[in-house]
Amino acid sequence: MGEWHGPQGPFDIPDIPNFVPRKLKPWLFILFVLIVQFSGGIYLAAATDMVGTTALMQEDILMAGYASLIGMSINFCVMFRLKFRFSNRVSLLSCALVLVVANLICSNTVCVPLLVATCFVAGWFRMWATFACNSTIQLWITPKRDMAIFFCYVYLIVDGIIQLSGISTIYTAFFSQWEYMHWIMSGLLILMIVLVLILVKPVKGPMQIPLLGIDWIGALLWSIVMLCFTFICVYGNFYDWWKAEEIIGATVLGLICLLINLWRATFLHHPYISFQALTNRNVKRATIIYLVFFTLMAPEHVFEHSYASAILGFDETNLIDLNWYVFVGIIIGCAFTYLTFATRRWRYKTMTAIAFAFAALYLGWFYFMIDYGVEKEMLFLPLFIRGFASVIISIVFLTSMTPDESKLHFFVFPQALTLNGFTGAVMGATLGPALIGEFLRITMTKNASMISARFTDFNAYSSHITLGELYGAVQQHALLISMKEMYGWLLLIALLCLIVITISYSQMRPSAIFPKWRTIRKIFKKEALLNSQ
């Protein structure tokens, strides 16, 4: 698979007519990627406004947002088949139309099951359109098809858009209302449809590979597993965990679907996710690293918003302005990873150690500096560090999934990408906040009771402060102390992980060269012929 790719000649996209300048053709597809990535179905940054104007809870909106990520992840296993079955014109038109409908539904419904299902479908088509565009311009980005370089571009787009989407959503809601973001994105998607109809020709490959042999039942079961896992993490605190029938039901359903999937993988010729992918060393290592690292980064979802709003008194616009700091960290992180990991071939161990070192700096800053008087500008450094470290981990361990690095057959490679999406984007974003949020609740209850015990004679203070004001002050101080305590424990874990990584031995360096599309087409053509017999 790791064949050398020499000079390919001037890059061109045959899907676009020649009256469009050759140098502008790739930028047209990048424009499509940006529009599609902004169209997430639901916009988590608008959660506060949605809760205030609809009957939805914060957990409902989070569940819908994570359902979109699950839809994106589950698509990885079929994205190559879709690439060789449909032209870019058909793919982009289909995805844009579905995303327009998804935006209209999400802006007009308060039915949680419909919202979750819509976001799941939107995520699936969002991934399809993104892959159709990125695979088309891959040779323009890296003529040698070096995946370490390509993934730097991918995460610059994906993680960068997450931050910019939040900023644009909040400012749209601030100047008008949150529904306008859906209408704006629907308009941009319609513009994309017009551009595709005018500028993208229906160019087909030498052979249209049929969608045969895909384990659609397995895809459905894996989706249910991840939706159940996400439901438990998102709604666990609300329902008081396994004391509620809802959490017990989700646990039982998820386990049943998981066991059925594992049982089917023992005899199916092509299960949706095979044991070869599940037991691969690089996949297991990436899963562990993702869960540990993003649990350390969980204060992003649990502490930072509460600290900035309840203690520092920031409003929504000031809160979302903090995303600019993270965005700068993502840009610098991608550039740093490109220059060191992708270009100079720094080791996986070195890059992982750097990421965990910066994670420790992020946690250490908050542990030592968190207080009532922190200025907005003082948050630049820790948020910059968080974005910088997170994007390094994501690029490095996604690169480790490629066939050259993981030694997986190319037909199994998309399965590893699906697992990477599950563990990195879904489990990493839900498990850590659920654990840290529960520990914060327990710690805050303990600290609040200890602080309250000091006020044994309230009458001495009754002439100066009301009971409600006193209770609020106690809760605020308990929150600050509890967050400081949690940051301290997470800092110790980060330092321990850094020590383990430092003393470990690894000489692995990135050598992930993507095979030619002609070679990939032959692989899937062979599999399709075998399945049709």
Image (cartoon, rainbow, N blue to C red):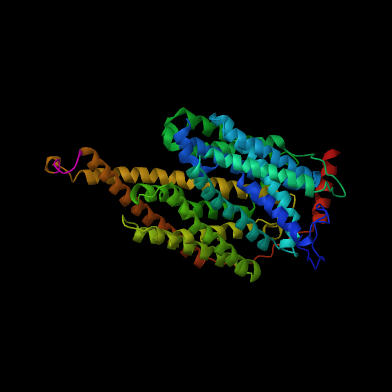
Tell which residue pokes out farthest to the left in this image: 460
Q: Can the viewer see residue 246 in this picture?
A: yes
Q: Nearer the viewer, residue 347 or 47?
A: 47
Q: Which residues are magenta?
A: 461-466
Q: Can the viewer see residue 263 in this picture?
A: no
Q: Position of residue 325 (x, y in %)?
A: 48, 59
Residue 213 falls left or right of residue 398: right
Question: Is 89 above or below relative to 22?
Answer: above
Q: Nearer the viewer, residue 297 or 335?
A: 335
Q: Position of residue 501 (x, y in %)?
A: 51, 64
Residue located at (79% from left, 60% from top)? 21
Q: Nearer the viewer, residue 61 or 411?
A: 61
Residue 4 falls left or right of residue 236: right
- Residue 208: quarter of image: top right
Q: Is residue 464 magenta?
A: yes
Residue 369 falls left or right of residue 179: left
Residue located at (46% from left, 48% from top)? 301
Task: Give the main secondary structure, helix, strand or loop, of the magenta stretch.
Answer: loop
Q: Is residue 469 magenta?
A: no
Q: Position of residue 200 (x, y in %)?
A: 79, 49
What quarter of the picture does the C terminus occupy? top right
- Residue 3: quarter of image: bottom right
Residue located at (41% from left, 59% from top)? 379
What quarter of the picture does the N terminus occupy? bottom right
Q: Position of residue 468 (x, y in %)?
A: 24, 38
